[in-house]
Amino acid sequence: MNIDWQNLGFGYMKTDYRFVSNFKDGKWDEGKMTTDDKVVINESAGVLQYAQTCFEGMKAYRTIDNRVVCFRPDLNASRMADSCRRLEMPVFPENRFIEAVKQVVEKNIDYVPPYGSGASLYLRPYMFGSNPVLGVKPATEFEFRIFASPVGPYFKGGAKPIILRVPDFDRAAPLGTGHVKAGLNYAMSLHAIVDAHNQGYNENMYLDSATRTKIEETGGANIIFVTKDNKVVTPKSPTILPSITRRSLMVVAEKYLGLKTEEREIHIEELKDFKECALCGTAAVLSPVGKVADHGKVIEFPSGMEKPGEITQKLYDTLTGIQMGKIEPPEGWIYEIKPSAVSV
């Protein structure tokens, strides 16, 4: 396979197989693998008219001993189930979700990048309302799919610290859908991220929309901070998406690095008190932040713009070490994809 693994960007590349299952008459069909990458739906499908869709993001890796593994897919299955309930969509059974993930990886095994390349096989499970609706109401038929695409780093330049800005836009309403992985959350962030890029920033650091005083997350990742006494702190809010990477990093900080951790409300005025900041998520893994621009005021973290801070680097090395098979994982974190047939 002629792929330049070392220079992959974070973009879509068609692979050979994807999984599809349809919900009709109150039940899911058996599902199947297909080589067809086209989705055909009615012009009045629920997803097109009222954005009834949710998705997940996860990765498969090749470990140091050449095993192919996925990282905590059970949490992706659980989070997608939560998204479906909030969006009035049928839950795709969590055990079948994991089996479908395994089968997609197995069928596209040649697209899993080699160990040490810095690349991975990104997996995108998603669901959408597929039957025609015109009045404002949930669809009654749905399609669940998973496709795969080999990807490189989410942010170009690898571990070089990025610059955030505090925008004049809100990410999520207090009782809205910020805590689930709904497509509509990302649609509303597109203008804000384009505007940020046009202004020379890498991402937006959103504040809570009720008071605009507390830090929440960015458009595509959770945020973690490191205090001057090496405590790892992350924002707490009912409108933040529960990042699987962030939850894993908090365990890594406490159990592997012996650091204190805390999830709490973080006010924007506290930025100057932290020594490190980073974005975390499946796509970004852990991306260091060097500066935050807040309406003419720039806060530069002591870790600087040249390289990740000491704790950020240790967190990254430990988490990726677990994912790549170099460090013993907590029980249940690593799912190996073996070359045997899987029934979905």
Image (spheres, rainbow, N blue to C red):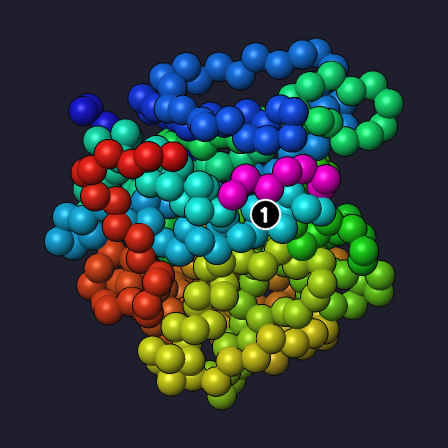
Q: Which residue lies furthest to the bottom in this view?
A: 229
Side (left or right) of 312 relative to 272: left
At 78% from the left edge and 20% from the top edge, which residue is drawn?
Answer: 133
Whether residue 25 is visible, yes or no, is yes
Image quarter for residue 272?
Answer: bottom right
Quadrant, the C terminus: top left
Image quarter for residue 110?
Answer: top left
At 73% from the left edge and 27% from the top edge, which residue is drawn?
Answer: 139
Which residue lies under the disc numbered 1?
Answer: 81
The percent position of residue 67, horizontal first and vertical second, equals 18, 49
Q: Mark 1: which secondary structure?
A: helix
Side (left or right) of 229 relative to 240: left
The percent position of residue 65, horizontal first and vertical second, equals 13, 53
Vertical side of 174 occupied by 344: above or below: above
What kind of residue is marked 1?
Ala
Side (left or right) of 155 relative to 179: left
- Point out the stretch of residues depicted in magenta: 87-93
The percent position of residue 242, horizontal first and vertical second, equals 58, 59
Quadrant, the N terminus: top left
Vertical side of 211 occupied by 228: above or below: below
At 26% from the left edge and 63% from the top edge, which residue is drawn?
Answer: 321
For label 1, the crowd category at 10 Å Cα-Cα, with few meaning under 14, some 14 to 19 and many 20 or more, is: many
99 vs 42, nearest the viewer: 99
